[in-house]
Image (cartoon, rainbow, N blue to C red):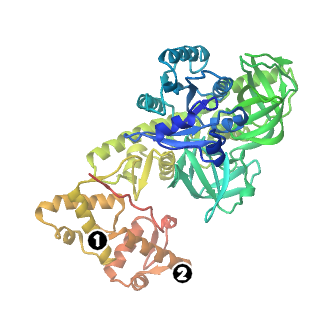
Amino acid sequence: MKHVIIGTAGHVDHGKTLLVKALTGIDTDRLVEEKKRGITIELGFAHLDFPDGTQAGIVDVPGHEKFIKNMLAGAGGIDLAMLVVAADEGFMPQTVEHLGILSLLGIRDGLVVITKCDMVEPDWVEMVKEDVKAQTEGTFLEGKPVYTVSAYTGEGIGELREKLRELIRAAAEKNLRSPFRLPIDRVFSVDGFGTVVTGTLIEGALAVGDMAEVLPTGFQARVRNLQVHGKDVETAFAGQRVAVNLAGTRKSDLARGDTIAKPGTVRKSLMLDVKLQNLKNSQRTILTSSQVHLYHGSSVRLSKVVLLDRDALQPGESCYAQLRMTEELSAKCGDRFVVRFYSPLETIGGGVVLDDCPARHKRGDKELLAALAIRESGSGDERLIQAVAKEGASLPSLDQLALSLGREKEELAVELGSLAASGELLEPLPGRYLAGSVFDKLWDACRGLLEQYHRQNPLHGGMKAPELRQKLMKGAEQAVSDAILAALAREGKIKAVADRYALADFTVHLTKKQTAIRDRILQAYRKAGLETPGLDDIYAMFEAKEQLDCKQVVESLVSGGGLVMLTPQICVHREVYEDVCRRTAAHFQAEPELTLAQFRDMLGTSRKYALAVLEYYDKNKILKKDGDIRRPGPAFSTLGEPEAPEEPAEV
């Protein structure tokens, strides 16, 4: 599922917050001072939902000049811009500044909304429209739609919502392949939970249980809980607004401007090599050694500008430069940033990071300038990406690539790590790589296989993992195919359901009659415990006209994980199986071996049912049989509490 962030921008008191409320029903002003003063100071967040399941987050950023720092913190994760202009005032200085910031941050799509149209005459609205067209000329909003609305009367809100839905559908997907990264824009404590941070996940996928490194301090903490739009989730994806509960941390350990990232994937530095642009409407010339405020993500650093090929950068010009900071910053190549004049504070330019951890450079070095030009174009990585792509889904290792390319491993490892961090390569297994283009083709094939399977088996939870592995990656090592399927699941494209895989948005739909049959079957299995009736006895519980539905529901329960099929005739309720797993795991914590007699006595059941469980364990390599005893098998680590089955929807 695509995750998109819409950002509002515009002058103070031009109606951004009221517009968001009219679109979503959510009031993003959460501070008492904001309510009292009627302006947005902190970042506000809402979610825009559509009947077809399309969803987007909305960041309502402050418009007042004094709160431009907060506006910059919110703008970093925006995919679509909604520039707001009040009909009674038109373009204002902060409107121009916000538009410049959005352009510097690389935002390429959006629209303009003229608010408060109920407060002026229609002729005046037309004049404001013409002014908007003139002011956006030469920017990414040139030629984009202009909507006239009134949040008070509701005029134009429906049309605006529909256009936003179109833009959301057309928006490019965020990079889910890079290691996760989230700039922190808020830190607070919650009773009973501890420290919580919020921000927009700008790359990758973050899951409960992941270890996260807090930068630039460098300490690590485990993700205890995640929320998206106030709801607990197991995994959050790039493009979502996320609240992260970090275990074992205090509020004083973190601060706005810090970043949480996958450990070891983001470096910290006191210098950045950049392509720097001076805005064409800037009133300042950027001189070498100028002091500026550098805005990156949610962080702000005092920085000295060192122009590498000139002494002065005039408005409308760009050049290579090195930014030297007074405090460490954590950034990645390709990141966007904004610079503001030291005093008085005004936005003068920005650009893109080309090297996130460079050495100190001398000005006028021609070799350096040529190297930065290559970094800007990215052409130096093409041969390496092609070499990885040539190996298809085999996941070549560092040693294999070094041999085929005739390269030194140490240097190559750095380049591979950089490409994996950018998402152009994936690292499904440690030290083994997959080209993004190959991964895309595997996803297209996987989607086709699962779509066909869901059409033919609408009551099954998904396709069995061995079948999907065989059809998608015939002949591949199981570790390789499992790692690639795990990467698809990590990106939210597919989901694991018991021992099967399904498309992420697939849901089993039962009729009212089938739902009643399901409930009756589950009740019978729950009541029976481990000593369950055979499947034929279950079918006999129902009338002849219900037999077909009964068999389909049983298949749905087995494929969806509600029932575990130990043998072709013996199924047990998922909760019963989980209890047996816990008791088995407890046994092996104390003893290295297990016999059938011990297992039968431990479970308090007959030999028939104890043997059925053990043979199921053997088949799935959870245990390994050696004569009359069993020991932990290769898949013993999977023993425990399997993922809860999904509840089929009733239709």
Please state if 436 lies on the left or on the right of 463 as rendered.
right
Horizontal and vertical percent position of residue 606: 33, 83
Q: Residue at x 77, y 34 (%)?
A: 294
Q: Is residue 170 above or below residue 454?
A: above
Q: Residue at x 59, y 13 (%)?
A: 134
The label on residue 80 is none
**Does residue 324 appear in the picture of this structure?**
yes
85 and 320: which is toward the camera = 85
Q: Residue at x 67, y 32 (%)?
A: 334
Disc 1 on helix, strand or loop?
A: helix
Please state if 454 lies on the left or on the right of 446 as rendered.
left
Q: Amino acid at mark 1?
A: Gln
Disc 2 on helix, strand or loop?
A: loop
Horizontal and vertical percent position of residue 66: 73, 35
Looking at the rendering, which quadrant does residue 522 occupy? bottom left
239 and 44: which is toward the camera = 44
Looking at the rendering, which quadrant does residue 108 occupy? top right
Q: Is residue 550 above or below residue 295?
A: below
Q: Quadrant of the N terminus?
A: top left
Horizontal and vertical percent position of residue 380: 67, 27
The label on residue 523 is 1
Dot 2: within a 10 Å radius of its alpha carbon, few (fewer than 14), some, or many (20 or more) residues? few
Q: Amino acid at mark 2?
A: Glu
Q: Is residue 289 above or below residue 201?
A: above
Q: Residue at x 28, y 71 (%)?
A: 523
The label on residue 591 is 2
